[in-house]
Amino acid sequence: MKKTIIGALALVASMTMNAQNAPQLRADNISEVIAAMTLEEKAQLLTGGGNDGFVGSGAMLGHQKKIVAGAAGLTVAIPRLGIPATVVADGPAGVHIDAHRDGTTQTFFATGFPVGTCLASTWNTDLVYQVGKAIGNETLEYGVDVILGPGMNLHRSPLCGRNFEYYSEDPVVTGLIGTAMVRGIQTQGVGVSAKHFAVNSQESDRTRVDERLSKRALRELYLRGFEMMVRESKPWTVMSAYNKINGQYAQGSKDLLTSVLRNEWGFDGIVMTDWIGKRSDLPTELEVAAGNDLMMPGYPAQVDDIVQAVKQGRLDIKDVDRNVRNMLEYIVKTPRFKGYAYSNQPDVKAHARITRQSSTEGMVLLKNEPLTVGGERVLPVKNLKQVALFGVNSYDFFSGGLGSGCVNVPYVVDMVQGLKNVGVTTTSQLTEIYQNYVKYAKAKLKADKNPEMWFLDQGQPKLDEIEITRRCVDHEQAVADAAIITIGRQAGEGLDRQIEGEFNLTDHEKAMIARVSDAFHAAGKPVIVIINSGSMMETASWRDRVDAILVAWQPGQEGGNSVADVLTGKANPSGRLTMTWPISAADVPSTKNFPQDPEYYNLTEKLYGGYMPGVNFTNHEEDIYVGYRYFDTFKRKVAYPFGFGLSYTDFEMSKPTAKVAGDNVELTITVKNVGKTAGKQVAQVYVKAPKGACEKPAKELKAFAKTRDLQPGESQTLRMTVPRRLLTSFDEAGDQWKGDAGTYTFLFGENVENIKAQAAVKLGTLTEKVTDALAPRQALQLLHQ
Ligand code: BGC
C-alpha cells in the first residue's frame, strides 16, 4: 500500500516537473516542442479522433460530440505541451454540424449553400470567393478550425454518386473555381481540406477500388485542378482519397503525397487521410512515410503501430518528426490555438443573401421556346397568377445532397414558398395533396429505415413520386395559368447512380410529363420543368414535350426563391453547364467501365472478398477523352454541350486579342449585350494547340470570365491570363509537360460548340520535367483518334 502511494506521488511529481519544464507550443518554438515530445505523444498527434489526450475514439462522421457536436473529427490535444485539440467539420456546401445539442435549446443551424455543380455553373470566381468567405466565417464562428472541402474530383462519369460535391468534368473549371473557394474560406483564418486527392471518381467500393489510368490522364485531368488550386491558394490541408491509383492506395503513395504534392507543387500544409480505420493491407507506417500527417478519424491501434514501427526500425523517426512539424505548423495557425472566442452566432441573414445570389446565378436555362410558332418565349413568364406544381420535389425541394456533404439547414425555401414570395399562388387542391403526401412519406421513410442506408439520416432522401391521374391534370389545367413540374434527383456518399430511374426518368415521371403536357398544351398553357438535381440527367427523350427547362441543381436553402426569381425575370439566368449533357448515358465513353450494379448494397460480402471488374477496379479506357474532350473531338451529338446555357438577352463577342507577355498569354474579348434585357455573359476560351507528338483533343478550355450585369447596348472588355504552362500536354515517355512550338488559336465562345471569335499567338517549345509517378501496372486499351 505504502509502495503504491509513494509510486503515485513520484508520478505526480514527475508530471508536475514535466509540465513545469515542458515548452508550451508557440509559433516560434516548434523545434523545441518536437524535441520535448515523447514518441507516444508524436504518434498520438498523427492519429486524430479523440480529445484531451484521449486518442483514437474512432469517431465517425457526425458522431463527434466533444467541443463541436456533429463535427467530423478532432486532432489530439497534448495539454502538457500546450497543444490544443482542433476541430474539423464537413463541407463543402456549408458547415456540417449538429443543429441541436444536448442540454441546450440553442440551435446551431448552418447556411446551406449551393452544391459544387451549382456554384461552378456560375462561372463567377468573385461570387464563389464571396461564398467561400461566408462559409469560412461560419466555420470560424461555430468553433471549427478546418472545413472538409472543397470537393475537387472530376466528373468522369455522370453516374458518380458524389458529382454534386464536385465542380466539373473540366480541370480548369475545377482549378479556378476551387482556387476562389479556398481563398475565400481561408480569408477567415480557418483552413480547408481539399478532397479527395486523387481520382476518387466513383463511390462503389470507394475504399478499395483501383482506378487504372494513364499517367497522361492522371496529370492532365485528375491532378490538374488540384495542382492549380494548390499553387494558387495554399490550402491548409488536403485529404488523401480512399481509392487506389494504378494499384497503389492514394494514402500509401509517397509519389503522390510527397513527390508531386509537396515537392513539385510546393504544398506546405498537412495531408489527412479520408475517414478510414486501420487498413489490413496498408500498414500505418507506410501511410506516415508516404506523407499523411494525420490519420483520420484515428484508431488507438494506429498509435501503437507508429510507436512499434519506429522502435523496430520499420519507420524512420525523421518521417514522424517531419509530419509532427507539419501538424504543429498547422495547429499554431488555427483559431483554437489562438484562443478565438467564437460566437456560435454567425450572421446567417447576410449569408442567406449570398447563398441566394449564388444559387440564382448557378441556375442553367436549357430550353425556352414559344408556345406557338412566332410567339414569345415562355420565360420569363408574364401575368402569372396561379400555377399547378407537379412533382414531389416541388414540395420537398432538395437543397443539397446526401452524406457527409449535407448541411443541417435552418429551412429550405421550396417552390410553393418561392413562388408565393413573388406573388404567384399554387393551386390549392394539388398543393394540399402533395404537402400531405410529403409529410406521410417522410414519416414512413423514417419508420422503415434500413440501417445499411446510414446516409439517409444525412440530408433529404428522395421520396417516391405519386401517380398523377388524367382527371387530376384536367382539373389543374382548368384553374392554373401554367404547369411547373419539378424532377428531383438525389445522390450521395457511398452509392453511385443507376441509369434506369436515376439518370433516366422513371415510368411515373414519363407519364406525368406526358399527361401534364398534353392537357396544358391543349389549353394553350405552358409547361416548365425544373431539374432539382446535383448532377445531370437524360433530357433528350422528353424535352420536346415541354416548353422550358431550368436546371436548378441542389441550390442550397434559398432554392425556391432563386427559381422564382429566374422564372419571373427578376433575375436573368447566367449559369452555364460545367459538364456535357449526353443524349444517353451509354454515349459517355466511361459508362462501359463504370460500376452499375443496382444490388451493390447486397454485394458487400462478395466485394470485400473479391474481384469484380468495374467495381474492384476501373479501367479508364476513355483516357483523356472525358466529357467534351470526347464529344467535341469525336464529333458526337450531345443533348446540351459543355458551357451551354440560355439567357433572356443576346450577346455579341468581338475584338478578340491574344498576346504573349512573359510566361503568360494575355487575352481580351469585348462582350456586348445586344438584346433587350440586362444580363451577364460568360466568355469561355478554348485553345487549339499545334499538332505535336502527343495526340490532342480538338480544343480544351483554358480560361473564362464573366461580365457584370450589362444593360442593353452596354459592352465590357474582359481580360484573362493563361499561363504558358497550362498550354502543355503531358508527355508520358519523357515524364514531362510539353508545349509544342507553333500557333495556338484561342477560340472565344458561348459554349464548346458555339465559338464567336478567335485570336492566335505563336509560342516556342516548353518542357518541364516532373517525377515519374503512378504509372499503370497493366496494359490499358486506351481510346485514340
Ligand atoms: C468522406 C469525406 C468526409 C469524411 C468525414 C468520408 O467518408 O469521404 O468526404 O469529409 O468522411 O466525414
Image (cartoon, rainbow, N blue to C red):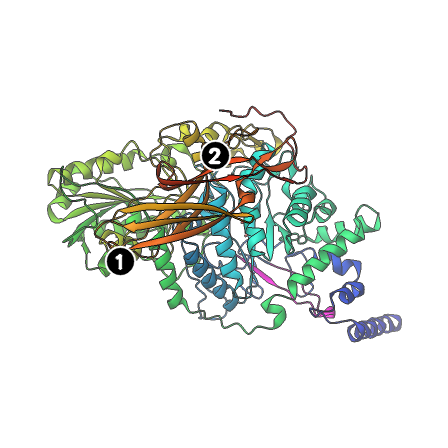
Q: Check residue 428 in the rendering and tell me which mark sits there, or answer none.
A: none
- Residue 568 quadrant: bottom left
Mark 2 vs mark 1, foreground winner is: 2
Q: Residues within 10 Å of mark 1 (few under 14, many from 20)?
A: many
Left or right of residue 565, residue 733 in this image: right
Count the marks: 2
Which residue is disc 1 drawn over? 417
The disc, 2 or 1, on the residue closer to the chain's N-terminal end is 1
The stretch of residues the image draws in magenta is: 74-90
Q: Is residue 132 visible?
A: yes
Q: Secondary structure at mark 2?
A: loop
Residue 358's spot in the image, x, y percent? 37, 56
Point 35% across, 50% down: residue: 670
Q: Does the beta carbon of the residue at mark 2 sit less than 8 Å from ligand 1? A: no
Q: Is 75 contained in the magenta span?
A: yes
Q: Is 475 contained in the magenta span?
A: no
Q: Quadrant of the N terminus?
A: bottom right
Residue type beneath disc 2: Val
Residue 501's spot in the image, x, y percent? 36, 35
Q: Secondary structure at mark 1?
A: helix
Q: Is residue 532 visible?
A: no
Which residue is disc 2 drawn over? 626
